[in-house]
Image (cartoon, helix red, strand yellow):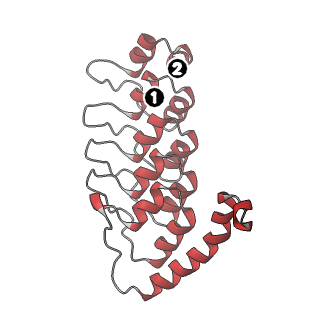
Amino acid sequence: MCSDDLISPALRHHAVLPSLLYVLSLSLSSVSSSIQPQGGGGRTALWKAAAYGHAEVVKLLIADGKADVDKAQNTGSTPLYIAAGRGHTEVVKLLITDGEAAVDKADNNGCTPLWKAANKGFTEIVKLLITDGKAAVDTARNDGCTPLYMAADTGKTDVVRLLVKGGADVNIARQGWTPLMAAKEEGHQAVVALLEQ
């Protein structure tokens, strides 16, 4: 057995990461133009780093100033959208605070980063988008489904609480159904109690 076999992949990753970040920072300093899309689908280096939760890489790319923070890939998904939808809280915070990302930029279906985070039940990200990002809480998907409607319909009580506290309109209906009606239909009693307050 080789001595390298005794080192876990996670330890090897953490040992190599600082060196990779250093090489990336040197590479960025030698690039004179904007960082262009890489690979299929129009995904940029920043989009990929955000998608995989690589906060240190995101931080370097933002600090470099050449990456377009709001550059969407072909489906309209921005770095903030993908990070919010995958639960990468630290990346979301960096994109909002350091990158000044457009928090309400929607994908091709009309889903905003807030909608995506609410759909997945990522309460910390929902809170960040509302408080730090000042996200518009009532922006609906193309089919009229608001973040509150979706959270009520799927029983995400903590998300519903954050959205209501953030000023979401509980009376916006989707195809004639309010969030309260959807929660009642699905039997989400905690959500019903919250919306009836």
| Residue in front for this viewpoint, 89 or 28 | 28
CB of mark 2 within 8 Å of CB of mark 1? yes
- In this view, the residue in front, 126 or 10, is 10
Residue at (30% x, 48% y) in the render: 107
| C-alpha distance separating marks 2 and 1 | 9 Å
Side of 110 relative to 28 (left or right): left
Work out which quarter of the rendered image holds the C terminus and state it: top right
Q: Is residue 19 above or below residue 194?
A: below
User: What number of labels is visible?
Assistant: 2
Q: Which mark is residue 151?
A: 1
**Apparent side of residue 36 relative to residue 188 in the rendered image (left or right):** left
Which residue is the site of mark 2?
191
- Left or right: residue 93 versus residue 145 is right
Please state, as top left, top right, bottom left or bottom right, where the N terminus lies in the image.
Answer: bottom right
Q: Picture coordinates of residue 37 (x, y %)?
A: 31, 68
Tell me the quarter of the picture where residue 141 sits. top left
Q: x%, y% of residue 170?
A: 42, 26
Q: Is residue 36 above or below residue 13?
A: below
As displayed, is residue 121 above or below residue 191?
below
